Image: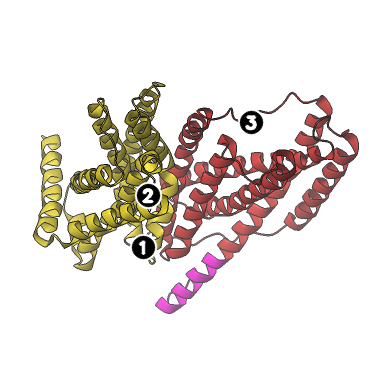
Chain colours: A red, B yellow
Amino acid sequence: MTDDVHSVQVPRSGGWTTFGVVSIAALIATQVFAFISSPPDVNMGQLEKILYVHVPAAWVMFLCFAIVLVYSLRFLWKGREEDDLLAAAAAEVGAIFNGLTLLLGMIWGKPAWGVWWVWDARLTSTLVLFLVFVGYLALRAFVEDPQRRGQWSAAVGILGALNVPIVWESVTWWRTLHQMPSTMQDMAKIYWVGMFANFGAMVLVMVYFIRRRYEAAAIERAAEHAAQAAALGGDE
Amino acid sequence: MAFRDDVRRIRAIAWKDLTTERRSKAGFNSVVALGVTILVLFGFALGPDAQALRDAAAGAIWLSALFAGVLAFNRSYQVEIESGALDQLLQYPGSRWAIYVGKLIANALFVGLMLLIVVAVGIALFQVKIPTAWPSLIGVFALGAVGLVVLGTFYAAMASRSRAREVLLPLLLFPMLVPVLLAAISATKALLVGDIMHESGAWIKLLAAYDLIFLVATLWAFEYVIEV
């Protein structure tokens, strides 16, 4: 079962700590910029400020799941364990951003709509996506054999990604029978600048997080390989 | 020639699974009993007002079928795993997807029969009036059951061979089935009240598309899932 497991390259930390500091600093800077530069919204007042974390978090979440899809496919294609670990790292980070998106959306929804939750297409699809990737991470936690864990979670990741547009479509239809889904209003340019700047900074943070999780997973795997080799009395 | 061999393999697997089921019967009977029990519990939660029951009937029937059906999928592998037969099955020559399709057919018959009983009991308990468009309703149930069985059989191939299989299968399966449930419940509901808004057609198309997409995707992915 583990015949085709080859040893994992342990990545070097290198300049990643600096990268992490820079990306967190960039996020703080773009947040401050967005707070200062944007005037209060006519309808929402200062409430619009939450969009600078909420919307970029949602975009980053999609980016993470795109990475899961790409690296899952690559793992099934080439069988390199690094790809599996990278997909898993992206899934973990994506789940965090997904949870953040939901939470921030609810914090915004309470004062804006008067309720914590509405069964609108966007909210509901995001929640379903969150549940799909909780399942993905649970599967990884319950399977020990690395080859099996890799191939199974790749399949679950690919099918989950395939399901996203279908869930979106079905929930939209389901909702439109009752009420129109919430749409983005036309926004002034200054809001967009703040939003994109924050998105850029958050992508840096995402890259940093994924890298760190990947490093940790790779080191864990390398330790397992070493223990296995020692147990077999090999010279590896 | 090769295709005919695959058909024979599929038939052999389906026949084997159904025979095991028929000889024991305990599995099917308890799954059906559970489905009916869940229906009764929904009745307690939603009733006893007749109109409220009728409005909720579609959702209650589908969810009962889902909760009972999920038990069938792990079973279809468990018997084999316990006796070590799955490893042998994989050693035989021939394509792996034939194993999947065989199990799919056996599970479809199992769940289809279970659904038939649950629906009949649901119609009686929830005081549903059978609409004139009942053939479409049968189509909705068939398409919904196929979606349920396709993903259920696929995910059970993993869940049944992991630790914590009882939790893992529903955890993986239910979020994936959201479109099936929404489409099946909405179409059933619409057809039960005479489809005044002509919305059932769109839902039926969605169900058919979902079934097709995931049938192809799981056929492709099964090889990777079963070989390890």
Quarter the N terminus of chain A occupies: bottom left
Q: Please name the residue that numbered disc 1 is placed on.
A: B165
Membership of A221 in magenta stretch? yes
Q: Measured from the top left, where is residue A71 in percent x and y?
A: 51, 45
Q: Measured from the top left, where is residue B101 in percent x and y?
A: 22, 43
Using the rendered image of the protein, determine whether residue A221 is visible from the camera's viewpoint.
yes
Mark 1 to mark 2: distance in Å?
36 Å
Q: Amino acid at mark 1?
A: Arg
Please, which chain is the residue tagged with disc 1 on? B
**Residue drawn at (50%, 72%) of the image:** A226
Mark 1 burial class by Cα count in 10 Å: few <14, some 14-19, many 20+: some
Secondary-structure class at tag 1:
helix
Q: Which residues are magenta?
A: A220-236
Q: Please name the residue that numbered disc 2 is placed on.
A: B48
Q: Are marks 1 and 2 in contact (CB under 8 Å)?
A: no
Mark 3 burial class by Cα count in 10 Å: few <14, some 14-19, many 20+: few
Q: Measured from the top left, where is residue A224 in percent x and y?
A: 49, 70
